[in-house]
Image: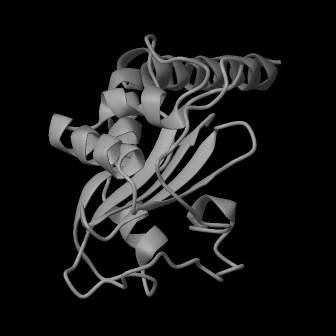
Amino acid sequence: MRWIVRFIAFRILRMLAVFAGIFAFFGIGWDDIRDRHNEWADRPDYAERVFADLLPITKVLASRQYRHWGPDRSSWDCTYAIVELADDAPDGPVTSARENDGWSFRFGGDWQQTSFDPVAEDTRDAVDYCGKYWPDAVAQRMRLSLSEPGHWFVEGAIGEVIFVYSKQHLLAARIRFGD
């Protein structure tokens, strides 16, 4: 009979230890986990991978592979890969043909010359919404690349994805609203 009591007591203690571990993980460690996730989201690796073997780049200007976690995050947010092109970048835009990397690493398509017409009122504007996350100098280069003639862009059907290529401003970007 004592072995049954010990067996039940051991099971109860084990269950309490599991609950305490879960509480510690989510209660105490949640902020650390969230901060690490958000830090990983903004690593330059994403932008480097989008443009790897496609364009010569000198540096990553802004990069976010997935949206941030946290109480102030929205249910829709941005992903982007914005790079500064090297001087020896092609004069015209290129399109990636890497099918195995997945849709979030594709760049290009049916390129059109700027100037960029703003999207309709009832659509999402990836550049306008996502621009709040970029440094001011990057946002300014993006605005110039889309408003001046002589640059290139591809826009998704409802404004959620846009690719930008500007040799003059040494800028290439993949921007998506809707993560």
Colouring mode (rainbow / by chain / secondary structure / one colour): one colour
Residue 6 is drawn in which quadrant?
A: top right
> Seen from this angle, which residue lies furthest front?
149
Which residue is at 44% across, 78% downward? 92
Residue 13 is drawn in which quadrant?
A: top right
Which residue is at 47% across, 50% downward? 65
Which residue is at 36% across, 81% downward? 91
Q: Left or right: 71 with respect to 169?
A: right
Visible residue check, residue 64: no
Q: Left or right: 80 with respect to 91?
A: right
Which residue is at 57% across, 65% downward? 105
Residue 34, position as x, y percentages in the image: 40, 29
> Seen from this angle, which residue lies furthest top?
71
Residue 9 is drawn in which quadrant?
A: top right
Residue 62, position as x, y percentages in the image: 30, 50
Is 3 rendered above or below residue 135?
A: above
